[in-house]
């Protein structure tokens, strides 16, 4: 009735930006990401306790955070078909700063989905786990498995065909590096959930974003298959620019970049002209993630620090969410 699971965060190379169904968290377009090691979140779920209790990073979760966790566990109970599971205790802890801009919620909800099913006595099933994780946070459906995962948008209104599948495991491209440049430790002004809603509802470019991102997913897959860093780097950058352009065109405009972000991007371009293979991607915040290879990760870190990075986290392709213990 108790299980502990470790999961890694992921960084989208082709971003998810906008929902067609807010309640079920169904996206308008497919996306593709890389799972990142060594960052991780460990989550324990125990059923059969006196009352529901949710603890995230040492704090009692409240409001919508708590609701999202409890809603996911309600789906676990439905899947188990077992009303006698009773209330649940959830304890979740990440080993990386929340302010890193990397959504720890992706790793957290992936770990919760896998631990929840295991604690309910259900067998491992990556599709069912990915769908469950998606109910917590969209990007979490891509953290159930390691390596390169593709969240297929699906067509069904019930979301049963909207989940992530692994295209290549972490061993496919071990030299690939993602270097997180923390330029700003502050909380972002507009959360992804609100920002993407604003873009869907008000950006005149939104339909173009959806069409373009959907078409980039198979291209990204081909570049990854060939381990073509330059082609993947260029694709990653243009996809990030297009997500941010769509958002800048929203009403009111959404600008996630700050001066340091723009400074780093210019600096990175200069480096590239000098032959350093480094590209960037940027989620809904000011902290870029640099894409490079093992031979250039030290140069990428130095570049980030020269541009004012307060901290730098060097990541490699990460593995699947793993069950640590089960009682
Ligand atoms: C920019 O998955 O955090 O990081 O589904 O509302 O919980 P919700 O949003 P979330 O959004 C992630 C947006 C992104 C791009 C991505 O990870 O694909």
Image: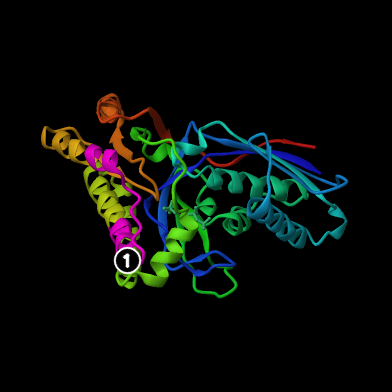
Between residue 15 and residue 60, name the one nearer to us.
60
Q: Quadrant of the C terminus?
A: top right
- In screen coordinates, is 121 left or right of 142? right
Between residue 108 and residue 310, name the one nearer to us.
310
* Disc 1 CB within 8 Å of nearest ligand 1 atom: no
Q: Residue at x 13, y 33 (%)?
A: 275
Q: Position of residue 176 (x, y in %)?
A: 34, 36
Magenta residues span 242-264
* Residue 318 can be seen in this image: no
State whether residue 76 is above or below residue 146.
below
Query: Where, by quadrant of the figure, is residue 221 drawn?
Result: bottom left
Q: Position of residue 215 (x, y in %)?
A: 31, 65
State whether residue 129 is above or below residue 293.
below
- In screen coordinates, is 152 left or right of 7? left
Q: Residues within 10 Å of mark 1 (few under 14, many from 20)?
A: many
Query: Where, by quadrant of the figure, is residue 219 drawn?
Result: bottom left
Q: Secondary structure at mark 1?
A: helix
Q: Position of residue 61 (x, y in %)?
A: 68, 45
Say if the magenta span includes residue 259: yes
Q: Quadrant of the N terminus?
A: top right
Say if the magenta span includes residue 221: no
Q: Position of residue 241 (x, y in %)?
A: 27, 54
Between residue 263 and residue 301, name the one nearer to us.
263
Q: Residue at x 30, y 60 (%)?
A: 248
Q: Which residue is mark 1?
A: 209
Display colour scheme: rainbow
- In screen coordinates, is 21 left or right of 229? right
């Amino acid at each position: 009735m108790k299980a502990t699971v470790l999961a890694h965060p992921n960084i989208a190379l082709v971003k998810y930006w906008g929902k067609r169904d807010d309640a079920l968290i169904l996206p308008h377009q497919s996306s593709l990401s890389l799972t990142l090691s060594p960052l991780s979140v460990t989550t324990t779920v125990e059923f059969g306790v006196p009352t529901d209790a949710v603890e995230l990073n040492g704090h009692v979760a409240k409001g919508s955070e708590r609701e999202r966790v409890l809603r996911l566990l309600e789906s676990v109970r439905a899947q188990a078909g077992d009303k006698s599971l009773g209330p649940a205790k959830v304890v979740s802890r990440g080993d990386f700063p929340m302010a890193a801009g990397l959504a720890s919620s992706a790793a957290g909800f992936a770990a919760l989905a896998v631990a929840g099913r295991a604690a309910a006595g259900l067998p491992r099933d990556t599709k069912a786990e990915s769908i469950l994780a998606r109910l917590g946070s969209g990007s979490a459906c891509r953290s159930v498995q390691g390596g390169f995962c593709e969240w297929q948008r699906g067509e069904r209104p019930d979301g049963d065909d909207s989940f992530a599948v692994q295209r290549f495991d972490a061993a496919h491209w071990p030299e690939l590096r993602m270097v997180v440049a923390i330029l700003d430790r502050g909380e972002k002004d507009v959360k992804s959930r609100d920002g993407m809603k604003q873009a869907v509802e008000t950006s005149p470019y939104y339909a173009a974003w959806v069409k373009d991102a959907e078409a980039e997913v198979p291209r990204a897959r081909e570049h990854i298959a060939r381990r073509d860093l330059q082609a993947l780097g260029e694709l990653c950058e243009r996809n990030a620019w297009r997500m941010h352009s769509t958002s800048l065109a929203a009403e009111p405009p959404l600008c996630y970049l700050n001066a340091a972000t723009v400074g780093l991007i210019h600096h990175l371009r200069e480096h590239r002209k000098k032959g350093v293979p480094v590209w960037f991607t940027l989620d809904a915040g000011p902290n870029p993630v640099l894409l490079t290879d093992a031979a250039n990760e030290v140069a990428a870190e130095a570049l980030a620090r020269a541009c004012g990075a307060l901290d730098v986290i060097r990541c490699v392709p990460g593995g699947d969410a793993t069950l640590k213990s089960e009682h």
